[in-house]
Amino acid sequence: MFQIVRLCPETGSWIMFESPLVYILSVSLQVGLLLNGFILKFYISQTQQQASRSLMVYLQNLTAADFLLCLCLPLRIIHYASNSAILHILHCSIGATSLYLNMYTSILFMGYIATVRTAHIVSTVTWVFLLAPTIAYNIMFFITHKPFTSDRCYCGPLFSTSFSILHKAFQISCTIIFLLVFICLVFFYYSISRRVLQAQQRQLASSGSEKLVKSRRNMLVLVSIFCVCFVPYHLARLPYAFLWDTNTVGRLLYYLKEAAAMVSVFNVCLDPLVYFYLCKTFRVHVRKASWRVNNPNKQTRRVRAATSQTKEL
């Protein structure tokens, strides 16, 4: 099997990226662009929505974050397939922070979707809250980074002493955000599940209990996507930030971190499921589009019939 091989002189080891890594990211890019492009088209074509206004704003921002990550994925893919020094520096700065921006935007908006509170103000504050440190991080990196070495596997050798401290503080802050949202999601799911169980024990079949069951299903989708995409990455990322320069442990954490980052990218493909389950209008739109694809002849006959009726009038 074809392999892209990089030599890391500082660790004395060969770091190998098998071609499936590039292929999987490429497929994720194409599927993510297709799904999120379809959702963006739905936003543009639909002026009135039946779903909660706050919920729609959060879902729109979630889609925007995923679409932005899709636009940044080519840089990560090319970095894996190239030994270019410039691409390595861009990957360690813009490429890494674009992944963080999408990841923590998705994490926060998943938390907001679980609560559904005042949307426009919260959305604006969230983007400013995440963009400001992201821009500052990149500026500091380009100002303080060390001269490029022959080690193109890790970003750590490029960090100055002061930037290394900033990087670790950045990682700790991101982990705190992740843990807070994760605890909230688990708490909300547990709370709704307990209320559903109480309703079932009382043998209630009212519309209120049906709404609880639906809410539990929606929360289960959120928690499942959250755990699949983000938990593995954080289990590997924070230890790696502190131990990357140790030979054996650092190497192992690097492999785990890169594999978990690839899994986290899947959220651009899985987030549309959140939209499908939480937005009734979008489900109807998808079913109509699916019907038109599966029944092109019927659709053509309807259009011709409508055209002939118009001509007769």
Image (spheres, rainbow, N blue to C red):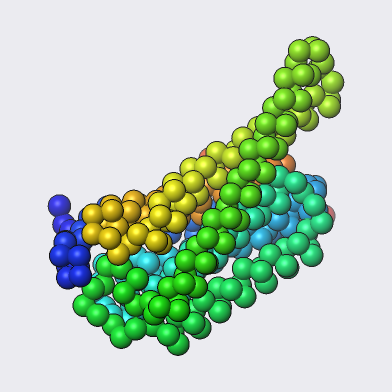
Residue found 84% across the figure and 21% down from its top: 206
Within the image, what quadrant is residue 156 found in?
A: bottom left
Residue 290 is at least partly visible in this image:
no
Residue found 34% across the figure and 77% down from its top: 158
Within the image, what quadrant is residue 191 found in?
A: top right
Within the image, what quadrant is residue 215 found in?
A: top right
Front residue of 137/43: it is 137
Give residue 13's position: percent from left, percent from top: 16, 61
- Whether residue 201 sits left or right of residue 139 in the image: it is right
Residue 305's place in the image compared with 42, above or below, is above
- Whether residue 288 sits left or right of residue 117 in the image: it is left
Give residue 297's position: percent from left, percent from top: 56, 43
Where is the C terminus found, in terms of image quarters? bottom right
Residue found 73% across the figure and 67% down from its top: 125
- Whether residue 185 sits left or right of residue 239 in the image: it is right
Give residue 85's position: percent from left, percent from top: 28, 80
Residue 166's place in the image compared with 185, above or below, is below
**Count of marks overlaid on the render:** 0
Residue found 71% across the figure and 45% down from its top: 114
